[in-house]
Amino acid sequence: MKDYFVHESSFVDDNVIIGKGTKIWHFCHILKNTRIGENCVLGQNVMAGPDVIIGHNCKIQNNVSIYKGVTLEDDVFCGPSCVFTNVINPRAFIERKDEFKQTLVKKGATIGANATIVCGNTIGKYALVGAGAVVTHNVPDYALVVGVPAKQLGWVCKCGITLKFVGNLGKCVCGNEYKIKSGQLIVLNEK
């Protein structure tokens, strides 16, 4: 007996692993050799694979395609219609599957609706990519990036709230505390 749910309108290819408690909704296609962790939710019209890794507790909203070369760590949120790429210079008439670039989305990161993640980049842990942003460079852990191309506007707490700083110290309403040192966010206290 399956301990996950796949809607009858969706297709799951061979050699796919789906974790306990995961829900795959309408019109999805999970391609071969893809691994999906426990307690994930894949909304309507999600495509993943082939050879994609999705961690535990990920939420992938409607109309997202996760192509070969993309890895989502645990607790990642992909907003509706966000876009991943895997080739820098695609042409319909040139086969470039041997040129796929890797994209890593680290633990707890959020990608807003309609954002585009250009391949070959890493989104840091607990980073927040604003809706409609186009990410063309690596995003640091806890960074808030917005715009086209995406630029860092500030820092976010693990809970997702934008941090406010007095000097180089920042405390979130949730109680987590951070410090900026040499342009990097340092965790002082985090739940």
Image: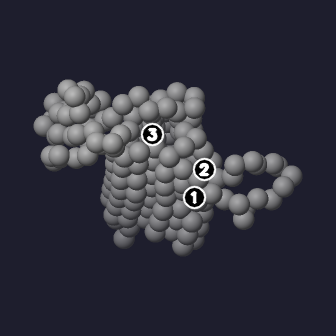
**How far across and how far down the image is residue 43, in percent?**
46, 44
Determine the residue located farthest toward the front in the rendered image.
182
**How far across and how far down the image is residue 108, in percent?**
34, 48
User: Which of the numbered marks, if any, corresponds to residue 102?
Assistant: 1
Give the Cα separation between the discs numbered 2 and 1. Answer: 6 Å
- Mark found first going from the N terminus, 1 or 3: 1
Task: State which mark lies toward you, 3 or 2.
Answer: 2
CB atoms of marks 2 and 1 within 8 Å: yes
Q: Is residue 142 left or right of residue 165?
A: right
Give the Cα separation between the discs numbered 1 and 3. Answer: 17 Å
Residue sitting at 22 percent across and 28 percent down?
Answer: 167
- Mark found first going from the N terminus, 2 or 1: 1
**How far across and how far down the image is residue 114, in percent?**
54, 33
CB atoms of marks 1 and 3 within 8 Å: no
Give the Cα separation between the discs numbered 3 and 2. Answer: 14 Å
- Mark found first going from the N terminus, 3 or 2: 3
Neighbour class for label 2 at 10 Å: few (<14), some, many (≥20)? many
Helix, strand or loop under label 2: loop
Residue 78 or residue 142, whichever sits in front: 142
Residue sitting at 52 percent across and 27 percent down?
Answer: 147
Q: Which residue is mark 3?
A: 111
Q: Amino acid at mark 3?
A: Ile
Neighbour class for label 3 at 10 Å: few (<14), some, many (≥20)? many
Determine the residue located farthest toward the right in the rendered image.
93
Q: Is residue 119 above or below residue 147?
A: below
User: Which of the numbered marks, if any, corresponds to residue 115?
Assistant: none
Q: Is residue 37 left or right of residue 15?
A: left
Residue sitting at 13 percent across and 37 percent down?
Answer: 175
Q: Which residue is mark 2?
A: 119
Which scheme is used to colour this image of the protein? one colour
Tell me, yes or no, if residue 4 can be seen here: no
